[in-house]
């Protein structure tokens, strides 16, 4: 049992099941991201933890205590919103002090805590400003300080960087992660941006149609996607249909060619599977030891700056491969026949 | 050619509104034969009945505003937050006082709360004052509700509420420390409109027989020549001062200066 436990959580709005059979155990101090496209139920799950939505069934336990029937203002949870939600009538310092004031903390302790929080977010001199006098990035930092000031048990962030421009997004995400690690606060982070989730999280929950498709570390999610959805949602992934010929040694037929993966597949002979491989795992050239090779025709080459992308045709299915752009590297001619190679372990066999 | 007509229309419009006012003001200054003076104003302001009725109406206005704010702000907030589907209905109800004449409302009150009813409010001075205050609040409801609702539209009520809740705030704290301060300019607009309505209201006060400013103006108007004109100018001044204050409050509310 973890510090924050979600046990078989369900949420329906009328006929629509937004969250289905969602279970998750989050350890104290862990940073977990809910990642998925809009409408996948990630925000609804977060709002259930915060207490703004009531689960249709299931339990939410924080520190062993079931909080489903506890009101949002009694849960001791800090929340950061996409729209910042700073109180426009209060100054930065008053915003940060709000939670402490509500809890009836003594005045000198509030003042000290506000100073500490403003120093932590790097805005020690802006306490007297009003929210409308701050930039978006500054406002979101104040919102973070405000959420953290009363020392909540759990910090919830609902797409906190979506409204900011790209540069600030990148700098703020490392700031948020640094603050989270410094305070050791249990954090749930909702985002639809895979880069954010991959770069910040201890673990990621990839959500799809209200279900947690896969829970794992960023590298597990990226390198070993468990389902076709996770594979297609995280990064760019080539997918081609194949038919199992010999499940024992992993022989599959793809685009009229035979591929021996050298591992048991756990599928019946003749079963249709999807093979997946990342563009950067493919290279042009004959296969070496532990690698598999396929012949394909070059359809298109794209120059992307640091990377060159080559699109090839494999029995009617397009595959793209990425090669670093080195001086002197030359791209194959469009229409030419090339041999593609990849490490056998990088070729994934996906289930639906 | 078009321009001449446009200016002509504007001039006509201005004269239509301004001439009676100028005439009335001129007349109110003409109490002393052959020269302009403030004699009529002096007489009016020195009249103890003026002082008494004006003070009565001011107190009634303040009580009405307090009651209106306590009634309308939580209602409009709740409707926006939890019952958005009920908004058209609530708006319709708040507009009813504009189409139901005050005299109908007050007759309804007298029938319902007379001395032989279950709740004999008209049986005592305090009860009648209370009834009159409710009547005033009803008359001011369309303006108060509209102002507050417009104010609520400019803030993200749902998210601010959730932010405050996650910081441990209960409903009273949310309303008092987050919602009300952010719609204060709108609440004050509604308050000044309420003030202007209450100060000039005649029907309800007269039929409930309360010593308000409206009936006093009527009595004076029926019996004197110059003083009613002076009184009308004073009443106009109060209304305009209220309008000016609405503008001033909107301009000087600091945190609403920025576009959100």
Image (tube, coloured by chain):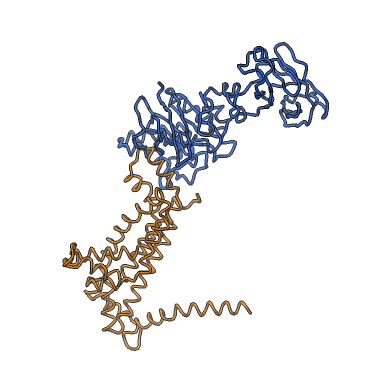
Q: Which residue is more in the foreground, A36 or A90?
A: A36
In orange, which chain? B
- Residue B194, by quadrant, is bottom left
- Residue B186, by quadrant, is bottom left
Q: Where in the figure is residue A335, as x and y percent of width and height?
A: 83, 29
Q: Where in the figure is residue A26, as x and y percent of width and height?
A: 44, 24
User: Image quadrant for the N terminus of chain A?
Assistant: top left
In blue, which chain? A
Which residue is drawn at the image coordinates 23% and 69% (left, top)? B111
Q: Where in the figure is residue A223, as x and y percent of width and height?
A: 61, 21
Q: Which residue is more in the foreground, A348 or A101?
A: A348
Q: Where in the figure is residue B140, as x and y percent of width and height?
A: 34, 64
With A351 as the anchor, is A251 left or right in this view? right
- Farthest top residue in view: A289
Q: Which residue is more in the foreground, B241 or A223?
A: A223
- Residue B178, compared with residue B189, is above or below; it is above
């Amino acid at each position: 049992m973890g510090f924050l436990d979600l046990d078989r959580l369900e949420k329906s709005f009328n006929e629509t099941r937004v969250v289905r059979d969602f279970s998750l155990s989050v350890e104290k101090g862990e940073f977990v991201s809910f990642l998925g496209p809009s409408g996948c139920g990630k925000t609804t799950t977060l709002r259930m933890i915060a207490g703004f939505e009531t689960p249709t069934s299931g339990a939410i336990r924080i520190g062993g205590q079931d909080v489903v029937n506890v009101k949002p203002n009694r849960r001791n949870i800090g929340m950061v919103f996409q729209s910042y939600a700073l109180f426009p009538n209060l100054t930065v310092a008053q915003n940060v002090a709000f939670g402490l004031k509500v809890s009836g903390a003594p005045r000198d302790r509030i003042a000290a805590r506000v100073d500490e929080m403003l120093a932590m977010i790097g805005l020690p001199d802006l306490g007297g400003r009003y929210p409308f006098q701050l930039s978006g990035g500054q406002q979101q930092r104040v919102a973070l300080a405000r959420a953290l000031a009363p020392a909540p048990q759990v910090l919830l962030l609902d797409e906190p960087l979506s409204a900011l421009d790209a540069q600030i997004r990148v700098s703020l995400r490392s700031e948020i992660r640094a603050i989270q690690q410094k305070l050791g606060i249990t954090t749930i982070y909702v985002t639809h941006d895979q880069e954010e989730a991959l770069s910040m999280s201890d673990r990621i929950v990839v959500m799809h149609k209200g279900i947690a498709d896969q829970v794992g570390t960023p590298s597990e999610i990226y390198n070993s996607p468990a389902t076709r959805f996770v594979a297609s949602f995280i990064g760019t992934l080539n997918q081609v249909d194949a038919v199992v010929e010999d499940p024992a040694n992993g022989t599959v037929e793809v685009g009229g060619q035979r591929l021996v993966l050298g591992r048991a597949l756990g599928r019946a002979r003749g079963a249709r599977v999807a093979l997946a491989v990342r563009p950067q795992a493919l290279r042009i050239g004959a296969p070496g030891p532990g690698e598999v090779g396929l012949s394909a025709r070059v359809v298109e080459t794209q120059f992307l700056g640091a990377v060159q992308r080559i699109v090839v045709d494999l029995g009617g299915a397009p595959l793209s491969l990425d090669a670093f752009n080195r001086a002197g590297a030359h791209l194959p001619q469009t229409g030419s026949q090339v041999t593609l190679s990849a490490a056998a372990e990088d070729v994934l066999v996906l289930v639906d | 050619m078009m321009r001449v007509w446009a200016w002509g229309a504007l001039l006509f419009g201005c004269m239509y509104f301004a001439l009676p006012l100028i005439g009335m003001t001129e007349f109110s200054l003409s109490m002393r034969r052959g020269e302009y003076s403030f004699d009529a104003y002096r007489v009016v302001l020195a009249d103890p009945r003026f002082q008494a009725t004006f003070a009565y109406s001011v107190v009634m206005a303040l009580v009405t505003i307090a009651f209106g704010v306590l009634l309308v702000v939580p209602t409009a907030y709740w409707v926006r937050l939890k019952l958005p589907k009920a908004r058209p209905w609530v708006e319709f109800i708040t507009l009813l006082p504009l189409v139901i004449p005050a005299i109908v409302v007050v007759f309804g009150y007298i029938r319902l709360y007379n001395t032989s009813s279950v709740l004999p409010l008209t049986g005592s001075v305090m009860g009648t004052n209370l009834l009159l205050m409710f009547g005033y609040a009803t008359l001011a409801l369309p303006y108060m509700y509209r102002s507050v609702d417009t104010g609520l539209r400019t803030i993200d009520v749902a998210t601010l509420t959730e932010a405050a809740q996650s910081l441990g705030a209960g409903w009273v704290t949310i309303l008092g420390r987050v919602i009300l301060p952010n719609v204060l300019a709108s609440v004050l607009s509604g308050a000044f409109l309420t003030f202007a309505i209450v100060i000039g209201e005649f029907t309800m006060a007269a039929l409930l027989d309360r010593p308000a400013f409206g009936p006093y103006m009527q009595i004076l108007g029926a019996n004197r020549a110059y003083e009613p004109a002076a009184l009308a100018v004073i009443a106009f001044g109060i209304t305009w001062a209220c309008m000016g204050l609405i503008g001033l409050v909107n301009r000087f509310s600091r945190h609403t200066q920025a576009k959100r």
